[in-house]
Image: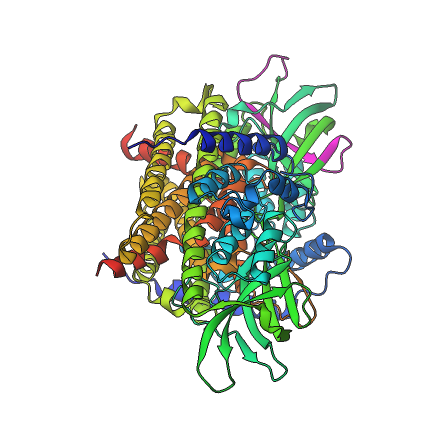
Amino acid sequence: MDLKHAASDEQFRQQARLFIGTKMAALGSESSPGSDRIQAHKARVSRWSQMLDDGGYLVHSWPTEWGGATWPRTWHRILQDEMIAARTPQTDSIGVGFVGPMLCKFGSPAQKARHLPRIRRAADFWCQGFSEAHAGSDTMAIRTRATRGKSEFTVNGQKLWTSNAHFADMMFTLVKSEGPNGRPLSGLTLLLIDMRTPGVTVRPVILIDGNHLVNEVTLDNVRVPFENLIGEEGKGWIYARSILADERTIVANLAGLKLSLKGVRNILSEPDSAPVHFRRCSTFGARLAEIEAELEALEFMELRLLHAPQGDASAQLFPAMLKLRASELSQKLSALTLEALGERALEMPGTSSADAGMPAPPIYFTIATSHFLSRRAATILGGTSEIQRNVIAGVGFGI
Amino acid sequence: MDFSLSTTQADLKATVERYCTDCFQRTSARAQDAAPPDARRHWEAFAELGWLGVLVPAELGGIGGDLLDASVILQEFGRSLVVQPYLPCAVVAVAALVRLPPGAVRDELISSIVHGKRITVLAHGESGFADDTGVIETSAQSSAAGGYVLNGRKPFVLSGNHADCFLVTAQRGEAAGPSELGVFLVKRDAPGLARRTFDTLDGRGAAELAFHDVHMESHALLGSGSSLTAALRSASEHGIVGICAEALGAMENLVHVTGAHLKSRKAYGVTLSTFQALQHRIADMLTELELSRSMFFRLLASLEQEDERLRERALSAAKALIGRSVKQSAAAGVQLHGGMGMVADYVIGKHFKQASMLDCLFGNADYHWDKCARLAA
């Protein structure tokens, strides 16, 4: 047993930190977006993605023949953690983390040649059209269907909860199709759809935090060329699941949770933020201590996952456990923060209207509110807690 | 013992329920109410129906009801996510006013509240946290010309965005001398009063108030000393009981809607209610609701108590337990709805946001558990 971090891991961390620091300085702060916030955001993400790609820090998890790195598993995690700690701009995680690896593994040569370089340059932004109103956890209940024409599919249906569809250039989507013999297939089919194709309509779905993140995408006789079919019809969900197996570790986001915890401790030491008697409140300190301890335990569970030998059963078990407990923990932390801040955290962000001379309140109140509301989805997205428990019982006990 | 409502109370409940169903659509995906809360039509209707005078004695123009009558109304409002300033004005502010010394200003104010002419709310706490040991720094210095000059700040005044006037507590006295707490009537358009209004999680709204040399006539002082202490205590008690009643109504609706969802929503070819794990979740939600309801009855019974310490403990225990229950139930309601639970326009997400308000207002669960522990010591 050796419970020390490898020296090479620490070296890599320093290297990554230096690179990130240098590039963040070169990127500069966000400029005033002017009239088009979305375009400004996309331009910034593109610039940042290109900087990362030039340094070999964007597609490191792809197969090596497509630009991936031969890193130990810990390094992928360390880079992610350093980027979160440095609050770097997001990259297009669906393109880089999902579509890219999927095309590497299952795409045709033409699809790889066309899309992989564009993903690396963030020339296209991607969205994931899986869920529907009647198909959330139950992916096989998808109803969107593709009928075969001479040279293309015609797609009809509606996707829901599609993050970023309102500015995505491309969507990869699961549909029911009939197969070359015209008989309906029991499996699902994976298609790439250009969001500018006639018949694609995107409608915002506003969530309880007041933000526009997800959408409803209606597909009305949308023509999709055969060259946009990935692999074989009917095998789409099998392809997607093989990539999703890694997605859970990303969704666990322990680094984000650690950052939040640090932020909460800072806020609570502000003199005006939480009344002194509440800080002295016996249950509050204990609750915070419990959250910190559980996060420490989860960090070590993640280390066990990253260092598990090939074929070890923990590789199947720990991702579900990490997602389950990290998501619940992030909700506990955001709830505790809201409660600690009292009445002033009951304010809905962006609704303030002040008479002249009224100073703006400290921003951490509405940040706490916003975070509390958006984190309510943590146990629903990326595989609900109920599904994670099913996986754990299945893998752990064969139930 | 008899836990049922009287005929009058049952009629009141039915009337309020009918009004809410007609005017405040509970499960609709559309906006709850076409007219924004500051269009007074609902408030005027409440006045006509006598609801604004529920806690006002007949001799002052009200219907001479009690906290249980007000609770019947509040429970329906909680169920239907009503955002009108009923609790802070017709319950909390009125509870304070009826215990202040009679006088022309006070009596006229009560009458105007009952008739729906003026929305008045209490602007008291300054820590931004329901803290009954908190210091009041807002000051009302005697002015040479007679009257007072008000300076200070109230960071969170529930429904302060809709109020026409405020009952502001301030330290009253000479510049360097002793002071005692007084309560003053301040109009919304008083020179020197600055407001910052904002929406709250549940849509009720609130305001932050700042007073810069606000000049008040001497008759703006409505009470001080021991009558004010009693009035503020009563206001706080009414607030706690009232918010617990709202929480009960909220839980009833969210448990009902979630149960209906489990019975109709399908996944993997069967309704969600087929899954035992989910049956257990909804069973827990229903049990919490009935536990909270039982605690609410206990709270009403405890208000007959003479012993102040026992009353305080009963109030804190109920507030903590019911606050905890409504938050847990609402979170479970969202989880059991999946993505739909996160949608701004759908009722379950609205109850989730409402639940955080109901727990936080008048002291959250942590605060009250701590208080219970201290009272027991």
A181 with respect to A282 (left or right) = right
Residue A130: % across, % down: 57, 33
Confirm whether residue A86 shows in the render: yes
State whether residue A32 is above or below residue A307.
Answer: below
In reply to whether residue A197 is colored magenta, the answer given is yes
Q: Residue B251, relative to residue B180: is it above or below?
A: above
Between B286 and A369, the residue placed more toward the observer is: B286
Quarter of the image for residue A178 reads: top right
**Residue A130 appears in the rendering:** no
The way the protein has been coloured in the rendering is rainbow
Count the labels in the image: 0
Q: Does residue A212 appear left or right of residue A36 in this picture?
A: left
- Of A63 and B191, nearer the camera is B191
Give me the residue at 61% from left, 35% from top. Answer: B24
- Name of the residue lying farthest toward the front: B59
Q: Position of residue B168 (x, y in %)?
A: 54, 66
The quarter of the rendered structure image containing the C terminus of chain A is top left
Q: What segment carries the magenta color?
A: A180-201
- Which residue is at the front of the view, A222 or B331? B331
Tell which of A248 and B50 is nearer to you: B50
**Is the residue B266 above or below the residue A324 in the image?**
above
Q: Quadrant of residue B294?
A: top left
B317 vs B192, left or right, is left
Residue A152 point in image, percent of width and height: 73, 24
- Which picture quadrant has residue A179? top right
Residue A31 in the image: state x and y as whole percent.
Answer: 70, 65
Q: Quadrant of the N terminus of chain A?
A: bottom left
Please tell me whether residue B175 belongs to the stretch shown in magenta.
Answer: no
